[in-house]
């Protein structure tokens, strides 16, 4: 579809936990052949592979520290320049702070890559809490589901890969979700204003069925 890094689709997917970022990123990934890049998953992959970045990260994360911004940006830069990201990428849940947003902008600029849009998926807090409390994922491919909002078409069988094993995070409960929402508003929400001033922010109503929200995103980005 796209022939070089300047003609691909480059998106940031942001919003509070439980707004459906991962689900919608998966939709875009399948539709356009994009790389879906979750910072958390990439960190774990670097450590599991024993890369130079992973070896620097492992003792920090083991000690309960956050991954330094410079290492995360280095990791993201290495990843987006790999051949499978030729059509573009979706950064899911990153950047999380103003500093990360600023450093990311500099890195993308140095690689002559321009963001098409930063998509903020907006969902009321009470809906988010209900979603996360019933959330689970396919062990095989990572597709996300919800008891209340998005069940597999065939009970117990993943829509994407046909897997039959699912997992649920222990911290997906009301008390923990409320704390995570508060942390998001304090730490990450300022990036929304940052990208608003940059003129690339697109707010999308995340309420509704997956295909309905996907259509809203398509309308917002014009693809």
Image (cartoon, grey):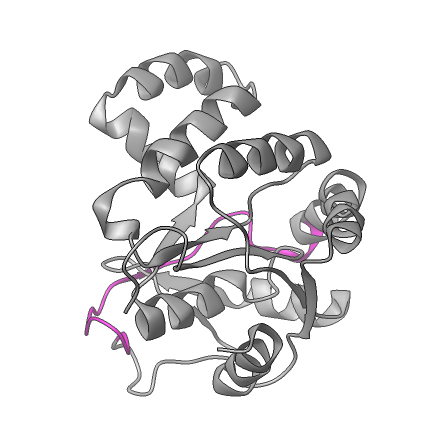
**Type of secondary structure dominating the magenta stretch:** loop
Query: Vertical placement of 59 versus 166: above or below?
Result: above
Residue 174 included in the magenta stretch of the image: yes
| The N terminus lies in quadrant | bottom left
* Residue 155 spot, x, y in % from top left: 31, 83
Does residue 116 show up? yes
Q: Is residue 105 found left or right of 57 in the rendered image? A: right
Q: Is residue 212 left or right of residue 81?
A: right
User: Quick check: 106 above or below 160?
Assistant: above
Nearest the camera: 56 or 85?
Answer: 85
The residue lying at 73 percent from left, 50 percent from top is 198
Q: Is residue 134 left or right of residue 41?
A: right
Image location (x, y in percent) of residue 123:
71, 70
Q: Tell me which residue sits at (66%, 33%) in the image.
A: 102
Q: For residue 78, which quarter of the picture?
A: top left
Q: Write down the region rendered in magenta.
A: 158-175
Instruction: Residue 55 in the image: state x and y as whole percent.
Output: 32, 14
Question: Is the residue 203 above or below the residue 53 in the image?
Answer: below
Could you tell me which residue is drawn at 59 percent across and 38 percent down? 105
Residue 30 or residue 162, whichever sits in front: 30
Would you say residue 138 sits in the magenta stretch? no
Across and down, in percent, residue 50 comes to: 23, 21
* Residue 149 appears in view: no
């Amino acid at each position: 579809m796209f022939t070089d890094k300047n003609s691909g689709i480059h998106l940031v997917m942001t919003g509070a936990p439980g707004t459906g970022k991962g689900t919608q990123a998966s939709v875009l990934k399948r539709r356009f052949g994009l790389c879906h890049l979750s910072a958390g998953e990439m960190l774990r992959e670097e450590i599991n592979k024993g890369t130079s970045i992973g070896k620097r990260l492992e003792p920090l994360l083991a000690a309960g520290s956050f991954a330094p911004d410079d290492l995360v940006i280095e990791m993201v830069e290495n990843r987006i320049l790999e051949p499978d990201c030729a059509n573009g990428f979706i950064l899911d849940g990153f950047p999380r702070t103003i500093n990360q947003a600023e450093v990311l902008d500099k890195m993308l600029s140095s690689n002559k890559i321009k963001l098409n849009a930063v998509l903020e998926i907006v969902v009321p807090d009470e809906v988010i809490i209900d979603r996360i409390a019933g959330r689970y994922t396919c062990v095989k491919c990572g597709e996300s589901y919800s008891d209340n909002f998005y069940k597999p078409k065939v009970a117990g069988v993943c829509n994407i890969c046909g897997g039959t094993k699912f997992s649920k995070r222990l911290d997906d409960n009301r008390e923990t979700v409320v704390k995570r929402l508060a942390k998001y508003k304090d730490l990450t929400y300022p990036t929304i204003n940052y990208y608003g001033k940059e003129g690339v922010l697109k707010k999308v109503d995340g309420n509704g069925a997956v295909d309905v929200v996907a259509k809203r995103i398509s309308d917002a980005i014009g693809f």
